[in-house]
Amino acid sequence: MKEQEPKQDRRIRRTQKLLKDSLIELMQEKEFKNISVKDITERADLNRGTFYLHYSDTYHLLQDIEDEVLMNFQVVIDNYKHSFQPGTLLPVLIPIIDYLGENAALCHILFENNASVDFMDRFHRLLHQNGFELIRAMFPDAKEPILSCCFEFSAYGLIGMLTQWLNSGQPLPKKTIAELADQAVMGTAEHLLAAQK
């Protein structure tokens, strides 16, 4: 029995990946609201019953994809937190942008997706949870309201920059966009917060 459980787990993961990949492919072809369970199962070459063993509807499947991407971003950040250096975010920006580049089609869909009511909000929260204390540590004398305003400006600017880079087909090398993002965020922080020391 114990030997069958890993096979069952692998089978479940394989089926879920087929469904996710099928939805991602379909979202490159048409709007999410026009994609049915039948579309997904036909693309995955699975039956509808199999779909409903794993997901209640197409929104549930989309939510699972979003959760997985956000978890992957968090893993990337956690793996590089020890590399943080004063005055730069490059040690964490480079792996984040590497992930974006390697998963460009998926990230482009999620960043632009109107079907999700909260993916970008959740991505913003992830940036806040991981970046706010880092900026605070770099500028310990900054006043809290100004620190918060600076961080929000930088976070939304970073999201906009990365979205534009994805939408335009990644015209700049990953290293270049990472350096531009770092300069934009740190330049803003230096200008607004360093003067308060």
Image: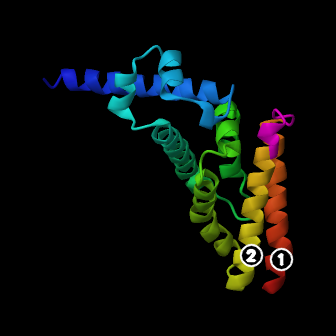
Instruction: Assess whether residue 56 is covered by the magenta stretch.
Output: no
Image: 17 above or below 95: above
Q: Residues within 10 Å of mark 1 (few under 14, many from 20)?
A: some
Q: Is residue 178 visible?
A: no
Which amino acid does the dot numbered 1 rest on? Answer: Leu
Count of numbered labels shown in the rendering: 2
Query: Observer-nearest residue: 20 or 137?
Result: 20
Image coordinates for residue 54, horizontal then vertical, percent: 36, 33
Considering every residue shown, the one lying at the far top of the view is 45
Image coordinates for residue 49, horizontal then vertical, percent: 34, 23
Residue at x 81% of width, y 41% of height: 165
Q: Quadrant of the N terminus?
A: top left
Secondary element type, mark 1: helix
Which amino acid does the dot numbered 2 rest on? Answer: Cys
Task: Check residue 43 in the rendering and tell me which mark sits there, or answer none.
Answer: none
Image coordinates for residue 66, horizontal then vertical, percent: 54, 43
Q: Which residue is mark 2?
A: 149
